[in-house]
Image: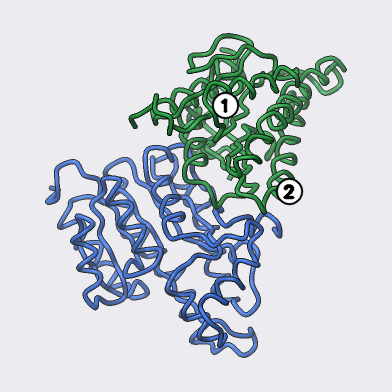
Chain colours: A green, B blue
Amino acid sequence: MSGSDGPESLVAVITGAASGIGAATAERFRRHGWRTAGIDLRPSDTDLPLRRDVTDAAGLRSAADATIAGFGRIDAAVTAAGYYEEGIDVCDITRRQWDRMLGVILGGTVNTLAAVLPYMMASRSGSIIAISSELALAGSATDLHYVAAKGAVLGLVKSLAAELAGTPIRVNAVAPGPTDTPLLAPDSLWRKPEYLATLPLRRLVRPDEVAATVCYLATEGAMYCGEVLSPNAGAVI
Amino acid sequence: MPAGPAGRPVALVTGAAQGLGHATALRLAADGFSVAVNDISDDGRLAALADRAAGLAVPGDIADPDAVTAMTAAVTARFGRIDALVANAAAMEMGPFLAQDAHAWWRQIEVNLSGHFRLIQAVVPHMRTAGSGRIVLIASGWGVIGHPNATAYAASKAGLIALAKGLGRELGPQGILANAIAPAYIDTEQLRVDASDAGITLDEMRQRYRDLVPTGQLATTDDIAAAVAFLAGPGGSAFVGQVLQPNGGVTRTRA
């Protein structure tokens, strides 16, 4: 847990690092001696805050370049950037809403992977961890665009994992249950006592529980290949 | 009251004399647990391991209900608590389904599935008293995707997976979190047995197994012990009824 400034310490790139799961993940990596580059629209509490929009592929390439310039390596990439919209009937989801959701969640993940993979390929090591959602496994009503985007991330992860299986680079996903972050509005369906009562753990997942799963995958997860780990309070079993 | 160092959580690991169970006991001890270690008998290895794991040796056949009762009582008498149970002991005897001797077939179910069922029944009341607990069932990739000539073993391990899911739903609301792990090819002493059975060298056996894994790697016992430690430790607190599959993609590519 020491030596965070030493040349040997590991480096994580985290998107969506300014809040919620991304912020908790950055905080946990730093506590374990990693250096962190935080990609977000807003400044993040990381060693290298990089203000970028994940839909901007060139911006993400420059963020990966800046991370290498600053730290010399990228050992893990975590794609947590995203947003959530609920309570929209399928017929009412506009083309604009659909495109933006796919652009940020799926496109943002693709852009991040494309930016960091050349460096991981060159060093022949690395762990990629995409944040998906239990909704991608179980399906859900009134947030179809979000669920479709998170499901697409799982297809991407499994296929990229297969493509890279012969290399030392590992690609996996974490599919949290409803997590207590600013993404869930105060009146969100997922915060209602009637919903929480259906969960085996009877509560929302905490961001630090998702972060712990990410760090486990990044540090001791060499045998996971295209897996989906589910810290979900029992939402999907 | 706890006889061990005050406040140290207590784990019980079955099948701990060698291989994965042995590595798991040492990992949990390193993470701060006092570890009670079980195997069917003790030729001295179990007692030696208990010394290294701040724990207690509780040898006994988990397929024997009386032995299960006795080992649970021994652990609680010594430590006053059981915080984590790692169900790792397993019997395996491969053979074509129609040629399998019924006794051998059912022995695998008795040890791997029914034995752990009874052990869970014995341990859960102590976890309920504490209001928390972790149960980690060591299943197998073969329990997920099946394997020729291993019907009993695969059935027992698939049973453990279903048990983790059912227990997750039933005990989760009480703070007792049950999950399973499905490894596939691990570099353990068993490989020597497999090589001998196949009439090839150990290195040839390793390569034969590597060829079955998309990542081309055999798991180390430490890889799987780390998964157990994660589920049994503070980081695993949102996992319930899940099946971790640290097997290099063996199950993902076929299931």
Residue A204 visible? The answer is yes
Against B161, is A126 above or below? above
Q: Which mark is residue A13?
A: 1
Tell me: B23 left or right of A169.
Answer: left
Tell me: A44 left or right of A7.
Answer: right
Residue closer to the observer: A151 or B207: B207
Q: Earlier in the sequence, mark 2 or mark 1?
A: 1
Residue closer to the observer: B114 or B189: B189
Q: Which residue is mark 2?
A: A163
The amino acid on which the numbered mark 2 sits, given as a three-letter code, is Glu
Q: Percent from the top left, x then y, of residue B13?
A: 33, 60
- Sort mark 2 into few (<14), some (14-19) or many (20+) by Cα contacts within 10 Å: few
Residue drawn 69% across the image and 28% down it: A115
The amino acid on which the numbered mark 1 sits, given as a three-letter code, is Val
**Chain for numbered disc 2:** A
Secondary structure beneath label 1 = strand
Q: Quadrant of the C terminus of chain A?
A: top right
Residue drawn 64% across the image and 72% down it: B147
